[in-house]
Amino acid sequence: MTSLTARRSRVAGEGWGVRTWLGVALPDHRSFPVVRRHLDVYRELLFLNLVLAVSEPTLALLVMGLALGRFVELAADVEYIVFVAPGVMAMFAMFATVGETLWGGYLRLAQQDTYGAMLATPARAEDIAAGEIIWGALRAVITVVAVLVVLAVLTPAWDILLSPLVILALPVAFLMGMLFSAISIAYIGYARSMHHLMYYFTIVINPMFWFSGAFFPLNELPGWAVTLGWFNPLAHVVDIFRGLMLGDVGWSHAGDVLWLAVVTPPLCWLAIWSIRRRLIR
Amino acid sequence: MTAEPTIESLRTPPPPMIEASGLRKRYGDFEAVAGIDLRVAPGEFFGLLGPNGAGKTSTIGMISCVLPVSAGTLHVAGLDVQRNDREIKSLLGVVPQNNNLDPDLSAHGNLISYARFFDIPRREAERRASEVLELVQLEERATARIDELSGGMARRLVLARALMSDPRLLVLDEPTTGLDPQARHLVWRKLQQLRERGVTMLLTTHYMEEAERLCDRIAVMDNGVIIDHGRPRDLIEQHAGGPVLQVRSLDGDTARLRDTLAAPLANGARLEEVGDLLYIYGLNDADSGRAEALIDDPYRISRRHANLEDVFLRLTGHGLQE
């Protein structure tokens, strides 16, 4: 059966005669061996990885929250460390995902030919890209768990984790991880060298990080900046995390989740399409 | 069309392992494979012989379903590569030109990780991993990191990886390029063992010795087309004939050398030039004796058996390796 978007190309030269949706086939369970491979590698250096996952956010929280916090007075009556905690969590989750999928992904794609080796199995380019996205998302979840542990330790001193709702940060982390994996992987399909990755990092990731509302309230900026901030996925994540930590959740947070849920699938499609285009010539 | 199975249909021989017709591969304006027909029977050891850029790697890329076919048809084990890529890939073991082993995993880890893509259960994967490591004589390096392996060991591990799925067709893209003679002979022995077990082999190489020694049948490729195919011995017989006289010219002056040898060459001998060397085919004993007397310098003239490189030279007018 053919529909408007699903078609089976039979013409030689038109690529695979498999069913494709807008140029890509649907990934199947062969994405999971890709995730398992990453898990194996992560577990090899488990201790180091966990130390990194915990120590970096701890340092950031103490420096930002306590040292910088002494000079900051917020309009709302909260301590700066409490304000900055959800931002630190979102930011490190983003960095973990981007580091894994951008640099790690590019290495596997262009230098180690890991994807080439995977293609020699029943896996397709689509499965490989999907596996990378899932692993990137899991990296965000792992990071959020690590930061939550740190925050839980700090909570008796400063009231940071005020609500059990914070457990919902895990699925949100998975969603944001998919989003940041997807844009990074879409980009590596185009990158021609390691140097190109820096453009993406400087032009795309860095501004998202600074203007995410992690360090200062975005909504107190001029109107145009608030509008611009709306397009920043990390700003929505910070909003959600902040609401969940304070136990102060409203419709605006549902809007944030909706924003992420609407934007992520097309980006995943783009990432899969980009990797397929790069691998299958 | 009748649905009833008949004795005739039950007797139908298995489909060829590889069947290509009018197969082409284009990259933009460049045509790497320019319409080839190919038929490899199950259990056969088939070689694609040709220089770099002949279209060998593109051909096996299409066979292993990682390059889309530009035109023509291609079936592997009776399945269409454009429709059944997953099924075909599950029957294949691929040894690529580059050792794309996973540097973040151990030798053993590479095998286990690979097996998961074939839905092989863990216990079975472990059993096969020890089996293939033993086959390629790497059982003691199971826990080694990839960068600790020598070139020959890494190559054998790539072969072991390709065997994890118990493939029906092994696709070998220049399996011994860059190996020292000892390592090369070890790989050859392993390939011969596998052939005896009934695995179909498709090998690309630009080493004529490799093709001659391993392959039941070869296709000689140049500029994206198959110029001739057949059993190595038949091809040699047909195109190069008996012994070959190889003469080195002085200061690369092959024209003068031709003049010098003009007399013995009168009797229907054929001549090819590669660099400063002149190869003379089809000489009878008397003529070749006269030529040897004319040159009278064992450093410059030698007589040898014809080989596949001569076949290639006769067919294309240029050498296999530049």
Image (cartoon, coloured by chain):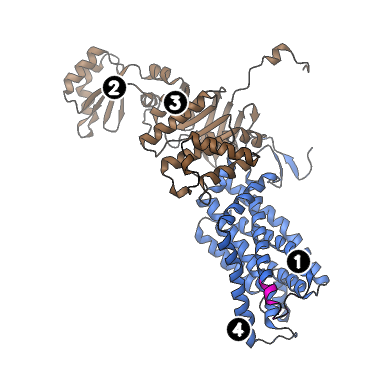
Q: Which residue is mark 2?
A: B304
**Amino acid type, callout 4:** Ala
Could one spot residue B248 in this view of the protein? yes
How many marks the image carries: the answer is 4
The extreme right residue here reads: A251
Report if residue B193 lies within the magenta region. no
- Residue range (magenta): A150-161
Q: Residue at x 68, y 87 (%)?
A: A73
Percent across and percent down for residue B286 are 22, 12
Q: Colour of chain A?
A: blue
**Amino acid type, callout 1:** Ile
Could one spot residue B97 in this view of the protein? no
Camera-side residue: B114 or A181? B114
Q: What is the chain letter for disc 2?
A: B
Q: Which residue is mark 4?
A: A67
Tag shown at residue A94:
none
Name the image quarter holding the N terminus of chain A. Answer: top right
**Amino acid type, callout 3:** Leu
From the viewer's perspective, is residue A116 above or below residue A53? above
Q: Which residue is mark 1?
A: A167
Percent across and percent down for residue A58 are 61, 73
Percent across and percent down for residue A83 are 70, 79
**Which numbered mark, 3 or 4, is in the foreground of this view?**
4
Q: Which residue is mark 3?
A: B214
**Amino acid type, callout 2:** Arg
CA distance separating discs 4 and 1: 28 Å
Q: Which comes sooner in the sequence, label 4 or label 1?
A: 4
Query: What chain is colored brown?
Result: B
Q: Which comes sooner in the sequence, label 3 or label 2?
A: 3
